[in-house]
Each structure stands twice: as structure tokens, then as C-alpha cells.
Image: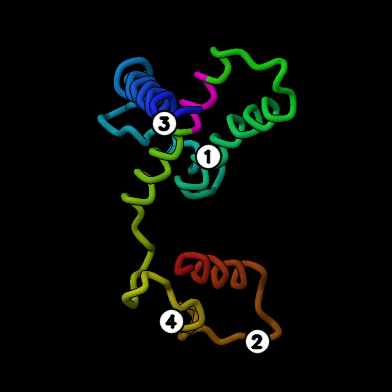
Amino acid sequence: MTPEDFETLVQNRIEECEAILFYEKDKEYTQNDDRLHNFKTAGKIQGITTEKAVVGMMMKHFVSILDMVDNPDTVTKPMVDSKFSDAINYMYFIEAALTEYKPKKNNDKTGKVPIVGSIEQATNDVEIDKEMTIGEAIKILERIKSVI
């Protein structure tokens, strides 16, 4: 492929991605002026982060792309346009989700939460004994879960 042909391919793909993101599916995926609404809701339903929800949804496009690579004789231009543009756009959604990401607790400059210290804080007034009820143990586990 010549450099000119490659540049044309890239420019066409960018235009296709923009058309999908800003005109074709904008209203379908935006609620309350939040472009990540569907991903946030999917993450909550599954008990995972928004970022992981986006990646999970993106996987169907990557599987289709892998199928195209495995069976290039069956590939059509509309298939390529659809799957490649969607896969690229999902990368933008992952970037947006990561840009919005806020750690639960930012106790240091790395953004990482020191788990051991957090667990100790969550349980510093808890006395563990062998006679603890299941309900008391569940409360302790819920407190630990809230800090990690």
C-alpha cells in the first residue's frame, strides 16, 4: 500500500468514526448529557468498573475482527467499516472512562490505595473472637469491602 493510499484509508476511517460518535449513535448512547451512561450502567449491573464494562462490550468487535482475519475470503467492506470503526470508537470510550476515573481513596501520589492500612482502619475497633456470629462477621467484611 502506498503512503498516499494509507493516508486516505486513515482519513476515511477517522471520518467514519466521527460520524458514528457525533451524529449516528450520539443520542442512542447519551443520557442526562453523559456519553458514558450506558457503560456506567452496565458496570453497575455487573458489579465492575465503567472501564471494564467498556472493554467487555468492545470484545464482541474484536472477536468479529479475529473472525475476519481467520476467514479473509468472507470479509466485505461494510463488515470492515462497521467493526473497525466500532473498535476504534470503543478505545475513545475507554480513554474517556479512564479520564473520569477517580480512585476510591487516594492516599498517596500513585493513586493506589494501601490495602493493608485500609483494612486495619476499617477493623481497628473490631475484636475478633471465635464466638462471633455470622452477622457480625458479615458486617466486618462489608467494612473491609468499602475501603478496597
Q: Earlier in the sequence, mark 4 or mark 2?
A: 4
**Secondary structure under the numbered disc 2 in the rendered image:** loop
Alpha-carbon span between mark 4 and mark 2:
18 Å
Q: Which residue is mark 4?
A: 121
Residue 9, by quadrant, is top left
For discs 1 and 3, the disc positioned in front in the rendered view = 3
Of 131 and 19, the residue lying toward us: 19
Q: Amino acid at mark 1?
A: Ile
Between marks 3 and 4, how big is the CA–CA gap? 59 Å
Whichever of callouts 4 and 1 sits on the residue coming sooner in the sequence is 1
What's the residue at 37%, 36% (across, down)?
36
Comparing labels 4 and 1, the label whose residue is closer to the camera: 1
Identify the amino acid type marked 4.
Gln
In the image, the segment drawn in magenta is 81-87
Report how many numbered discs are placed on residues in the image.
Answer: 4
Q: Which residue is mark 2?
A: 129
- Most common secondary structure along the magenta stretch: helix
